[in-house]
Amino acid sequence: MADRYLSFATSRVGAALVGRLGLPSPARLVRHRPGLPVARGPVLLGESDGGRLGTALRAALDSCGAELVPHAEAPAALVFDATGIRETGRLDQLHAFLHPRIRALAPCGRLLVLGTPPELAASPGESAAQRALDGFVRSAAKELRAGATAHLLLVAPGAEDAIESTVRFALSARSAYVSGQAVRIGPGRRATVPEDWERPLAGRTALVTGAARGIGATVAEVLHRDGARVIGVDVPAMGAELRATMRPLAGTAVELDITAADAPDRLAERVAGLDILVHNAGITRDRTLGRMAADRWRAVLDVNLVAVERLTERLAPALPEGGRIVFTSSISGIAGNVGQTNYAASKAGLIGLTQALAPVLADRAVTVNAVAPGFIETRMTAAVPFPVRAAGRRLNSLSQGGLPVDVAEAVAYLASPGSGAVTGQLLRVCGQALLGA
């Protein structure tokens, strides 16, 4: 469903009125399209004294085609290596670089801060200083305007050469609806540089559940765009829509109820050579707990969590070294929601599954991550009562709902061979929603 307020607020007359009245002022977000440069203008790079990412960061930015300049009237990105801030008194360096430049950031620009995971700091003072970066980036993200977003990359010592995939995602239009988030890039994990960053999944096979329509269909389309051969799975009742989705992708449609007792074995027989497993299938059966019948409770848990666990247990051992697993959680699983005890429990369970499986599969360089969408414009949210829909759209830093492609871009980033140093992560795709912030 179209967001009429967004259309009005971004018109010439509407923008003037919205500004005069102090109403939410969303911007038209620039989203990725093939051929669009990673950074759509000049990039200003700053470094704390003694930062350890200088060489690797410059190499990543150079590979991205970023134009590094000492000054710019409207920079497309501000990037700061804060790894040298090893005591709280040196946080002034962050302020000194960004204070005179932040208001000049271009529309839909990017603020990117790189630090060290606080738990890996060498001293309590360094841990405090690096933890401070999280509060700084989350707050700065809420101050940005005109569709600009902020990101924090926490790079473990030894992982300096594995940052490019995440730098590309954070700086690019692929991350249009991700803001105020921290991504950890871990040590000792293998990241493979794709031969072609426009088609990083070439030669790989991806399975997407719930692929007939909505977010799942868009995930399949984006993975195909990035070079993957796609296998789409959905219930037999959605067979016609599933086949229609797979046809232009030259993909394979598998009609299957993933909650069936024999579903894991049946699926395993159909997906030899699988590289990427994306669990997207999910349902809602909302009621307050006192009015929720047992069948509604059980249906949601079975589809959203139990079936996912069973399928992963069966399919994960067959993934090759460097395989990828991505779960679709939700901000409801982080913050809860009225009438969604079943849904929130299932989505929180997926976060737990992500964190538990990541270290288990790390010895084969198989990564396990989850995305947590916020309010995304789909058929399901179009059926939400208008007051709830309006609140969902506005109660985030970008003052608008996201699109299915925003979730799909995050999945594709996590599925990339270049993202091998990112595992056990939950990436919120919510425009920095206030819910659970």
Image: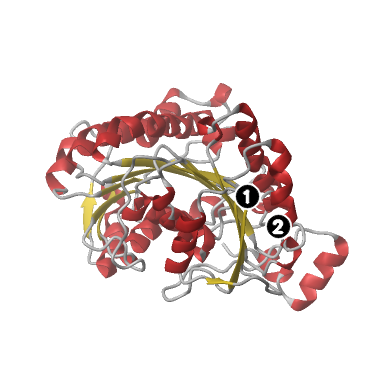
For the point 77% across and 72% down, which residue is it? 14
In the image as oriented, which residue stretches furthest toward the right? 20
Q: Does dot 1 land on a helix, a strand or a loop? A: loop
Find the distance from the CA under tag 2 to the CA under tag 1: 12 Å
For the point 39% across and 51% down, which residue is it? 162
Q: Quadrant of residue 143?
A: bottom right
- Relative height, residue 102 to residue 42 (above, below): above
Position in image of residue 19 (x %, y %) = 83, 66
- Mark 2 sits on what residue? 97
Given residues 261 and 17, the one toward you in this image is 17
Nearer the viewer's eye, disc 2 or disc 1? 1
Res 13 label: none
User: Pointer 2 and pointer 1: residues touching (CB < 8 Å)?
Assistant: no
Given residues 296 and 83, the one toward you in this image is 83
For the point 29% across and 46% down, which residue is it? 235
- Mark 1 sits on what residue? 49
Q: Residues within 10 Å of mark 1 (few under 14, many from 20)?
A: some
Given residues 237 and 379, the one toward you in this image is 379
Q: Residues within 10 Å of mark 2 (few under 14, many from 20)?
A: some
Position in image of residue 45 (x %, y %) = 60, 62
- Relative height, residue 155 to residue 293 (above, below): below
- Relative height, residue 119 to residue 204 (above, below): above
Given the image, on which type of amino acid does mark 1 rest? Asp
Position in image of residue 151 (x %, y %) = 58, 52
- Relative height, residue 381 to residue 71 (above, below): above
- Specify which label sits upstream in the sequence, 2 or 1: 1
